[in-house]
Image (tube, grey):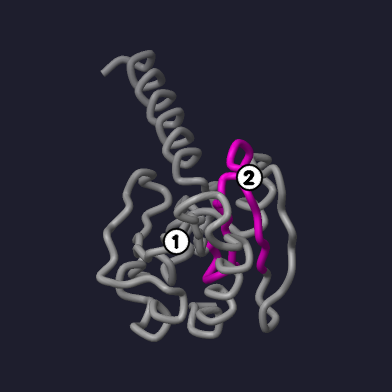
Amino acid sequence: MSTLFRAVVAKTAGVALLGLTACSGGSPERTAGGEATTSAEAAPGLESFDVCNFLAPDDLSAAGVAGPGEPDNNLKSEPGCNYSGTKMDLTLYKVPGTTFEKYTTQGNFAEIEPFEIGGRKAATGVTTGSQGQGICSTFLDAAGGTIIVTVTGEDRDSVDACGESRKVAERVSPRLPE
């Protein structure tokens, strides 16, 4: 193998690794052995977090939705589970590779209101383009990543989407991984 060929292969592999890191939402970090990891690998608590089996029947009935949940894998980096009700839908997402701070400051929110739930960082927000549509999310800091509780009203005025998402978040926050 020529030196030029090895250099091209090494450079291509480096660019691919940077691309994968960017897609995972993480940044390269070093382990004690010097190996590169991403923050997604550093957040095993959310990697194994099961969004479709976390909410208890009491959580679902309190929110006015029913199970079983339907997996929502529209975004690979944010797997979720959707529960339907008569006035609203509730979706629970996890983002294991993106910290709460990074997720809530990425700039795609028209409205965001930070607060705390039992010492846990939280925020309620509406994405740009969703204002006035009856859609709102509450974001929770969990295990080095972010948990998202999204409420979508059946119509714009069927529910207070931000209030409902916050109620669910407050209910489940104590059970989330640290």
Picture coordinates of residue 46, whole percent (x, y): 43, 67
Q: Secondary structure at mark 1?
A: strand
Taking depth in this image into account, of 112 and 7 the one nearest to the observer is 112
Taking depth in this image into account, of 22 and 112 the one nearest to the observer is 112
Q: Is residue 67 left or right of residue 143?
A: left
Q: Is residue 127 magenta?
A: yes
Q: Amino acid at mark 1?
A: Met
Q: Mark 1, residues whose alpha carbon is within 10 Å: few (<14), some, or many (≥20)? A: many
- Disc on the earlier residue, 2 or 1: 1
Instruction: Give the magenta part as a residue range.
Output: 122-146
Q: Secondary structure at mark 2?
A: loop
Picture coordinates of residue 108, whole percent (x, y): 64, 40
Res. 20 image quadrant: top left
Which quarter of the image is occupied by the C terminus?
Answer: bottom right
Q: Amino acid at mark 2?
A: Gly
Residue 126 visible here: yes
Q: Residue at x 49, y 78 (%)?
A: 176
The residue that disc 1 covers is 88
Q: Residue at x 53, y 74 (%)?
A: 168
The residue that disc 2 covers is 132
Res. 138 image quadrant: bottom right
